[in-house]
Amino acid sequence: MTAHLPILQVIIPLMAAPICLILKRAKLVWLFSLIVSVLAFSVSVLLLQQVMTSGVISYELGGWQAPWGIEYRIDKLNAFVLLIITSISTLVLIAAQASIEKEIPKDKHTLFYVLFLLSLTGMLGIVATGDAFNVFVFLEISSLSAYALIALGKNRRALWASYQYLIMGTIGATFILIGIGLMYQMTGTLNMQDLSQRLPEVAATRTVFVAFAFVTVGLCLKLALFPLHLWLPNAYAFAPSIVTAFFAATATKVAIYLLIRFTFSVFGLSFSFTTIPLQTVFMALGLIGIFVASSTAIYQNNIKHVFAYSSISQIGYMIIGFSLSSVTGLTSTLLHLFNHALMKSAIFLALAAIMFRVGNVQLDNFRGLGRQMPLTMAAIVVGGLSLIGVPLTVGFVSKWYLLTALLEQGWWPIAALVLLASILAVVYVWRIVEVAYFKEPLPDRAPVKEAPLIFLVPIWILVIANVYFGIDTRFSVQVAESAAQSLFGVSL
Amino acid sequence: MIVGLFNDWVVVVLMMIGLYIVIAHGNLVKKLIGLSIFQTSVFIFYISMAKVDGGTAPILADGVTQYSNPLPHVLILTAIVVGIATTALGLSLVVRIKEAYSSIEEENIQKQDNKALKQSAMEQQA
């Protein structure tokens, strides 16, 4: 059983998706998906344990040997990302039933869970697989279900957002497909491990350069790096709240994982960072992204838009850490991957709760919510503090590591700018706090009740995690650091 | 140069035509057509990559020693299925957009959205 864990991780949600269609009753399907997600979570916990104690797990699909057959390869990096995805999906699913009750028509509830599980399958598959073409297939499984999930949103703008995401996402995925094709043309292999050994021999050819460019640009589209982020704000803002909570915490993270995987493991450190000026490009784009997105966030009136733009700026932090190509830099990126998933899922789940009670998340409707929904608003405040990077929250830990990494290489002007950008975060979080706590409630609205427990439990688990991992950093830092070290160990 | 790389030229030309349509056209269906052309160019790229000079179909037979590489063909079968799914999903989205906005022109939809935004902003001020 334990030998088959890598494939179970992917196949459990995949098989569960069609079973949902047979179960039909929405409540039943909800319980079933929740159980499936818990199962997937336990598999990823076991995988991480196994990887931390006994090293890389290689699983050959159907018993076909590695370079010919498809290999699932679990190392510290992807075990960590798998854990992030499955834990968030489980917590988000707890609140799903109550939330979609108000946001999605009754007859589509079952389909919602089918799509959710397929999307989960896709993400887990992307992360677990060690085969470049398999990545493309899973990428499309997760993206196609994501488009459909976003289109379920109540507002008609959800359709338009989903369409735009479909166009951008497909271009991105096709770029990745072209890149993989060019790599295959040069090396005759699709296995990532095998690719990493064969690519250096042909690294000086133009084909490999083009392959690298296509893969990187395609991935940057998927991870919404500035200036390729245009699909993200509307897609997050108009999707059903639960979908936003899930995607904000996982979808872009998976793309960042892929970027790390391709640049560090497949193309290798020396090619990605020495032959190609990736550092300059990414650092500049990351920094501009942080400033542009944070300042746009300040002017938004739809709070989901605020945090969607904030997600884009947080991606900038991750990319800067990544661009340093040092162990500390990569550690900060991986830490932020984990920490940002915690903060954003807490915030967006809290917004889902407000959506449930109030019906929309326009800034004006936040008036008086500080007193009427104290627990939900407190969660947004803690999440917001974490976004800013206040000590004792997770946001502080990852920013601290990012600053150390920047100063390690003498990039102090960039470090100063990163700190400056945190002030922008203070501004957009403060706007919400001000309205929610210091303004009188709308006179013509009946007082709102606190969100039901089914929302509060997952929200507060995440909030407590936000604080806990901000104080006791042993688990997250140890895993992130050893994952970063192993990546450098492979390529050096 | 041109004759030898004929397939590659076709791929590049189709790819650019496809991308151009996606970017330049405001009609949502035309955009999807462009996207399909763009994807098809990649299919052709994979398939022509697999061709081995003088090789035949990869079926074991007497007297044949050289085969074309079947793997890219299989890969592209998967990619074609993905492409069809994408187009189908995109078209169904267009149908629903048409129902919601009664238009499938990008400009028109954008205008309607902006108008709605302005209205809600004015209501808030009032």
Image (cartoon, helix red, strand yellow):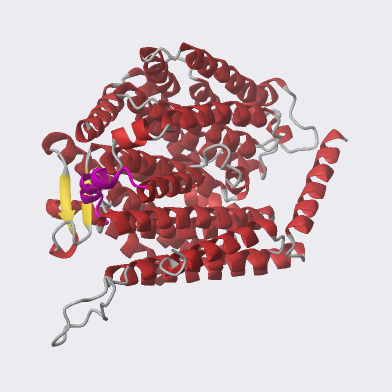
The quarter of the image holding the N terminus of chain A is: bottom left
* Residue drawn where x is 41% and y is 40% of the image: A256
Does A256 appear above or below A115?
A: above
Q: State left or right for residue A98 relative to residue A302.
A: left
Q: Main secondary structure of the magenta part?
A: helix
Q: State whether residue B73 appears in this view.
A: yes
Q: In which quarter of the image is residue A138?
A: bottom left
Q: State left or right for residue B49 relative to residue A289.
A: left
Indicate the position of residue B30 as horizontal and vertical percent values. Answer: 66, 67
* Residue drawn where x is 42% and y is 44% of the image: A255
Q: In which quarter of the image is residue A276?
A: top left
Q: Residues in magenta?
A: A190-205
Q: State left or right for residue A118 relative to residue A98.
A: left
Indicate the position of residue A70 as horizontal and vertical percent values. Answer: 22, 59
Q: In which quarter of the image is residue B105?
A: bottom right
| The magenta stretch spans residue A197 | yes
Viewer-proximal residue among A453 and A323: A323
Farthest-out residue, bottom: B62
| The magenta stretch spans residue A459 | no
